[in-house]
Amino acid sequence: MISWTGFDKPIVKIGLIGCGRMGRCMLECMMKSGYPVIVYDKYPPAIESAKEMGAQAAETPRQLAAAADIVLMSLPGPAQLEDVIWGESGLIYGMTSDHVIIDTSTVDPGTTRSFSARIAEEIGAAYLDCPILGRPSAAGKWMLPTGGNPKALEKVRPVLLTFAADAISVGASGAGNALKLLNQLMFSCINAISAEVMAISDHVGIDKEVFYATVAGSSAATVSGLFREVGKSIVENRFTSPSFTVDLLIKDAKLGLQMAADANAPSVIAGMVQIYNELAHTEGLGVQDTSSLYKVFSQHYQTLN
């Protein structure tokens, strides 16, 4: 294993791989704070948009790594991460033991531990799992539970705080991912019960708009920010402009359920909810907002009456 040597090295330029919804939020915040950023994305329109914001574009991950001091990644899953790091012209070929890799993607802890160990063995760079708790609209207020070298986190904290309220060390490599997946299981369950009670209200003589307005406007302990978002989407019949899609929730919950099962602590409640998430997908709702589970429950109750 090669030691990380970047603690006292300045951050002159930041690399960002993945300029989707979350990546774009990070890019905008970092550039507003005065950091020069070089980006890479396989999707040409995402690169063009980033360039219009003032970012420099790299042709390959290797080129990006050679130009940047730290690298942020915001990618769909483990396969994309592995390709970016070890694929043709991957990050690994342009990095040194001074680098810090910060993965904000939602992946399983095992993947992170494996990648972190492999990178430490091959080049010595620090690898942080730093998933995001928060939606795109909350950029600047995000919480970043982080696993990995605490000294590496301290080095990159000023960059992270351009788009997050805080970044905290929660344990060794993979701990940030584990915490995020637990959060996603909670998200799945709160989303489902919010959609379900809104569908039930239609059948017990309570107008769903009245239910939503009354509960959301109260100080009841059942009220959450997620209920307010999900309920509002249902009341406004706004499912096709997703804050978070059903398919993304299925992916995250699947990772969380597998993590729990591997730890011999299988989830009962989130496991049942996942059945409804997958049913929504089979009914063509995968690209819609998670609030579209309302349609699944509503249709179910209609068949019973």
Image (spheres, rainbow, N blue to C red):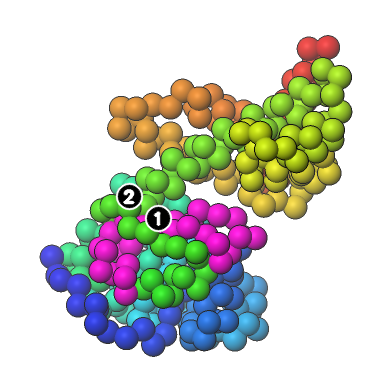
Spot occupied by residue 181 in the image (x, y as percentages of width and height): 44, 43
Q: Which residues are magenta?
A: 127-155
Q: Secondary structure at mark 2?
A: helix
Spot occupied by residue 223 in the image (x, y as percentages of width and height): 65, 37
**Mark 2 or mark 1, earlier in chain:** 1
Asked whether the residues under the numbered discs 2 and 1 touch, taking CB atoms below 8 Å apart as contact, a structural biologist would say: yes
- The relative height of residue 188 versus residue 229 in the rendered view (above or below) is above
For label 1, the residue is 145
Say which amino acid is labelled 1.
Pro
Residue nearest the viewer, comparing 119 with 272: 272
- Image quarter hosting the C terminus: top right
Q: Quadrant of residue 301?
A: top right
Q: Secondary structure at mark 1?
A: strand
For label 2, the residue is 175
Q: Is residue 14 left or right of residue 113?
A: right
**Residue appearing at x 84%, y 35% in the figure:** 209
Specify the farthest residue to the top.
305
Q: Is residue 245 left or right of residue 40?
A: right
Count of all numbered marks drawn on residues in the image: 2
Spot occupied by residue 163 in the image (x, y as percentages of width and height): 52, 69
Spot occupied by residue 13 in the image (x, y as percentages of width and height): 42, 85
Say which amino acid is labelled 2.
Ala
- Image quarter hosting the N terminus: bottom left
